């Protein structure tokens, strides 16, 4: 495609206008076609927004760069890091995919084709020799919907697979070019796709029972590749006879290609073939090394001078909320809409849509990997994505791990984060992935991990955090809240503090305390930016989707919602105003002297006051229950000076739990025993050891106690049984 065609492909509303085209500008809310597009004489695309938008902003809005406006240069064009860029499109044929790569990067240096066992092509490896002497490789692979610039599905086939079945001896080299060189000498040769680090991703079973010679490159990665392949082959049934044959006089990093070149044109292929055969016969069969019984490792500090570290800006998926290359924790109660939020995130990433912030930043265009245990993909996840407007071809679900047995059978097994390499392999197939969602994180820790132990949680999440940095993807961990309340929102996350500790950003999803149907997305921990404003939305439609409110909740954080709710929900008993009113009523009732508890109960019932409230009022007034005589009934009376309370004086201060209440410390009943032994009607909520008593056999009780210490459950005692409110 030419630059003008590439741009028009991203502007579906573009219409022909004179010698060019016109369209609505994607960089601002354009009601009329204010964007002009035309082709320059040199083949570049000319863009102008008549409303004043910068060309870079216009291109960014459709996922392009300024370089995309220019025709391709002759020869490969490396990016800043020396690698070639690749597209994310699907092509009808492999030739179309290669042609698109050449359009972007120039004429290829070489291309190799991989086939399945029937001889059908399944993948290509395309190579460019860069001007600086390096090389760059791009894989092309067949998928159900066409060909893509992406690695082949795993397990990958061996190079030259159709030729291996009839061969008795096979040579393994590192790289397709080296395998072709071995073939030029008359050998049957193969290799694995993906380079020296990807040998485990290939199906080596076609080499079972054969004689295999491995020719390593003359460097450390080459020798490691040879050892890795040999180890894989040793586990096949029947095991092949493996020999690692090192070619002599190779330059550093050299391989069989250099060895053949060193012989020159005067040496016949049969002669070089005979030399390799003689070398192989002199090499013993490779066998796995016995595990060492002695620890020879030595620990050394790995120091980094920060003066050598180049400062970098934090990359963001959603500015201020979800950083790229980091872990983000999304915390909320079950059923509050967390999965709907993750579907909304995936939809925006899949379509390069605006975030719901007032700034109208766009999500980076890319794929999303969903790791979801609780929702069905057919009746829940897909309908929600459709409702959110997602491009579902850019959203992928990792349901389980597949195990391929030696007999070719396949079975699925449960997946957890102890196998983080499975996510790495999935990301290899999704080179444009921007977002990974684990929902909920508790379902993927593994059966041997205690979610409440920091060290066990960190052992699982730390490799995932390292993978996020390695691949530059945002990882959102969905976390439920614990049942117990907390003073700070981040303490509400279920399980160990390691979840919050490893996350660089924590977002809280909660219902508006004043409107249960209104949901709030509020910031908690913010390590990489100033706290962003909160946002609010409602869940509408069926299947549900999010309808965001346009105005942000400036200065509103999750702690502002949790703290008030915590103080309300953790208080015992009625509101202070209710208790104070009951205290005034009780003080007025007892102003003329003590009364039997039975009579007080009747008076409270007539006044429509619950006995629980009266008991709290009794405690607030400092009333000490006592018996009129041995075996007599209980009565309550105001403490000394209590008459003045009923005449408008201030109610006595409620004794803090850390103090010894004076009436418990000093007052003794008519029996001469401390009133702790006869705590009728008194509320005891503290550890009674703080009162200085011998409490080895003394039980703590509360308003709902059905029995009292020392067996006090006397029928004459009106509080010796559970009393209804």
Image (cartoon, rainbow, N blue to C red):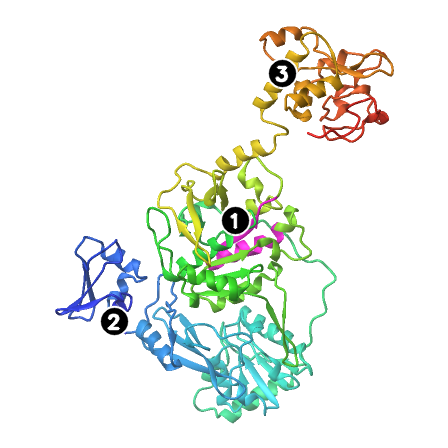
x and y, in percent, of residue 428 in the image: 49, 67
Q: Can residue 699 be seen in this snapshot? A: yes
Circles 2 and 1 in contact, beta carbons < 8 Å: no
Q: Nearer the viewer, residue 267 or 649?
A: 649
Task: Tell me the residue that label 1 is attached to.
Answer: 336
Q: Nearer the viewer, residue 51 or 724?
A: 724
x, y (%) of residue 129?
A: 37, 74
Query: How far is disc 2 from disc 1 in space, using C-alphas?
Result: 45 Å
Asked which quadrant contains residue 7, the reply is bottom left
Tell whether label 3 touches label 1 (CB within 8 Å): no
* Quadrant assignment, res 670: top right
- CA–CA distance between discs 2 and 3? 86 Å
Viewer-nearest of discs 1 and 3: 3
Q: Position of residue 234 (x, y in %)?
A: 67, 77
Q: Which residue is mark 2?
A: 5
Instruction: Decide if residue 207 is on the left or right side of residue 104.
Output: right
Q: Is residue 87 left or right of residue 617?
A: left
């Amino acid at each position: 495609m030419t630059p003008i065609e590439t741009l028009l492909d991203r502007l579906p509303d573009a219409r022909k206008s004179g010698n060019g085209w016109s369209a609505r500008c994607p960089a601002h809310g354009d009601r009329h076609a204010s964007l002009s597009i035309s082709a320059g004489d040199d083949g570049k695309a000319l863009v102008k927004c008549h409303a004043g938008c910068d060309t870079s902003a216009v291109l960014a809005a459709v996922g392009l760069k300024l370089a995309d406006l220019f025709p391709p240069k002759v020869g490969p064009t490396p990016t800043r890091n020396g690698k070639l860029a690749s597209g994310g499109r699907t092509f009808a044929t492999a030739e179309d995919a290669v042609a698109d790569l050449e359009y972007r990067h120039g004429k290829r240096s070489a291309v190799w084709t991989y086939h399945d066992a029937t001889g059908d092509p399944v993948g290509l490896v395309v190579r460019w020799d860069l001007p600086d002497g390096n090389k760059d490789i791009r894989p092309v692979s067949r998928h159900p919907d066409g060909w893509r610039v992406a690695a082949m599905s795993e397990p990958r086939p061996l190079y030259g697979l159709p030729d291996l079945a009839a061969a008795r001896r096979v040579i393994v080299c590192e790289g397709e070019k080296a395998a072709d060189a071995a073939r030029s000498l008359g050998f049957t040769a193969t290799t694995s796709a993906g380079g020296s680090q990807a040998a485990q991703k290939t199906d080596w079973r076609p080499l079972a029972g054969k004689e295999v010679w491995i020719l390593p490159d003359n460097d450390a990665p080459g020798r490691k590749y040879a050892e890795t392949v040999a180890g894989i082959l040793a586990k096949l049934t029947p095991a092949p006879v493996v020999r690692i044959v090192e070619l002599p006089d190779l330059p550093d990093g050299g391989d069989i290609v250099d060895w053949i070149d060193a012989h020159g044109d005067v040496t016949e292929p049969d002669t070089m073939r005979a030399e390799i055969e003689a070398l192989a016969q002199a090499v013993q069969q490779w066998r796995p090394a016995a595990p060492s019984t002695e620890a020879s490792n030595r620990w050394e500090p790995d120091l980094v001078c920060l003066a050598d570290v180049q400062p970098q800006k934090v990359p963001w998926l959603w500015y201020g909320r979800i950083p790229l290359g980091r872990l983000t924790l999304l915390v909320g109660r079950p059923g509050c809409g967390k999965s709907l939020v993750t579907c909304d995130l995936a939809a925006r990433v899949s379509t390069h849509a605006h975030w719901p912030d007032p700034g109208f930043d766009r999500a980076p265009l890319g794929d999303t990997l969903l790791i979801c245990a609780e929702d069905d993909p057919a009746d829940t996840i897909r309908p929600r994505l459709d409702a959110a407007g997602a491009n579902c071809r850019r959203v992928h679900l990792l349901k389980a791990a597949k195990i391929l047995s030696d007999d070719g059978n396949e079975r699925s097994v449960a997946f957890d984060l102890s196998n983080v390499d499975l996510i790495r392999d999935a990301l290899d197939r999704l080179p444009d992935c921007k977002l990974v969602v684990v929902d909920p994180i508790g379902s993927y820790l593994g059966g041997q991990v205690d979610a409440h132990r920091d060290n066990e949680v960190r052992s699982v999440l730390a490799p995932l955090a390292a993978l996020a940095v390695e691949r530059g993807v945002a990882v959102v961990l969905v976390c439920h809240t614990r049942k117990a309340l907390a003073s700070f929102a981040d303490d509400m996350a279920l399980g160990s503090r390691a979840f919050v500790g490893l996350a660089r950003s924590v977002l809280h999803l909660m219902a508006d305390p004043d409107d249960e149907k209104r949901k709030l997305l509020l910031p908690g921990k913010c390590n990489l930016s100033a706290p962003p404003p909160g946002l609010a939305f409602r869940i509408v439609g069926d299947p549900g989707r999010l309808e965001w409110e346009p105005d942000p909740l400036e200065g509103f954080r999750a702690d502002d919602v949790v703290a008030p709710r915590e103080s309300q929900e953790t208080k015992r008993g009625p509101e202070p105003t209710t208790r104070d009113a009951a205290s005034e009523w009780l003080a007025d009732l007892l102003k003329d002297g003590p009364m039997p508890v039975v009579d007080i109960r009747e008076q409270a019932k007539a006044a429509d006051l619950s006995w629980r409230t009266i008991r709290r009022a009794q405690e607030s007034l400092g009333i000490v229950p006592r018996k009129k005589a041995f075996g007599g009934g209980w009565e309550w009376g105001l403490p000394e000076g209590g008459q003045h309370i009923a005449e408008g004086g201030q109610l006595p201060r409620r004794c803090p739990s850390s103090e010894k209440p004076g009436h418990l410390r000093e007052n003794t009943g008519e029996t001469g025993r401390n009133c702790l032994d006869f705590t009728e009607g008194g509320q005891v909520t503290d550890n009674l050891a703080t009162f200085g008593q011998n409490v080895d056999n003394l039980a703590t009780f509360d308003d709902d106690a059905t029995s009292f210490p020392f067996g006090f459950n006397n029928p004459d005692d009106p509080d010796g049984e559970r009393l209804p409110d």
